[in-house]
Every structure is written in C-alpha cells, then in structure tokens.
Amino acid sequence: MDYVITALTDCNMRLEEPDGTSREVTVPGGTAYARDKGVEHNVINSGETRMSFVEVELK
C-alpha cells in the first residue's frame, strides 16, 4: 500500500535493498514523506541513538 512516514526523531538509517545493495539515509525529526506501494527495503538504525517514526499505510 502507499504510505506516509513521519520521523519523530532524527533517523539515521541504512536501507538494504532486495538486490543486496544498501544506502545510508538521514531523515530529520519532524520530516514527513510519502512512498508508493511496492517499495521494498529493510530499515536498520545506523545511528548511535534510538530513532522513532510513525508509518501510516493508506488504504
């Protein structure tokens, strides 16, 4: 499903893609963004502190 993410804290993430590649992304706290359905990745906290975000799937 399409979804919206809102970062509650600064989120330093490593995104592991299905093809085996990975990338580092920083999403500042308070930032919101949307993604279309079908996005696949494994999200790993790559920072030194806890991270927190809210994900809402749109039906």
Image (cartoon, grey):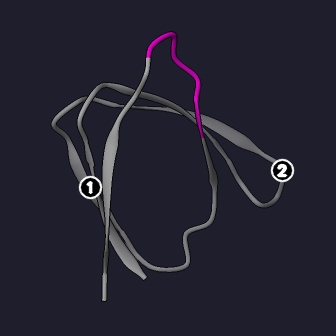
Amino acid type for the residue under numbered disc 1: Tyr
Badge number at residue 20: 2
Q: State which tag comes first along the sequence, 2 or 1.
A: 2
- Residue 13 image point, x, y percent: 52, 33
Task: Name, please, the residue furthest toward the bottom.
Answer: 59
Q: Quadrant of residue 15?
A: top right
Tally the numbered discs. Answer: 2
Q: Disc 1 marks which residue? A: 33
- The span picked out in magenta is 44-49
What residue appears at the point 20 percent right and 41 percent down from the top-left corner?
31
Query: For numbered disc 1, what is the local secondary structure?
Result: strand
For the stretch drawn in magenta, the main secondary structure is loop
Number of other residues with Cα within 10 Å of mark 2, as a class: few under 14, some 14 to 19, many 20 or more: few
Question: Which corner quadrant holds the N terminus?
Answer: bottom left
Q: Position of residue 28 (x, y in %)?
A: 27, 29
Q: CA distance from mark 2 to mark 1?
A: 24 Å
Residue 38: within the magenta? no
Q: Secondary structure at mark 2?
A: loop
Q: Which mark is residue 24?
A: none
Three-letter code, disc 2: Gly
Q: Is residue 45 left or right of residue 9?
A: right
Give the residue drawn at x 84%, y 50%: 20
Q: Residue furthest right?
A: 20
Dot 1 alpha-carbon crowd within 10 angstroms: few under 14, some 14 to 19, many 20 or more: few
- Determine the residue positioned at 31% across, 89% down: 59
Say above or below: 15 vs 25: below
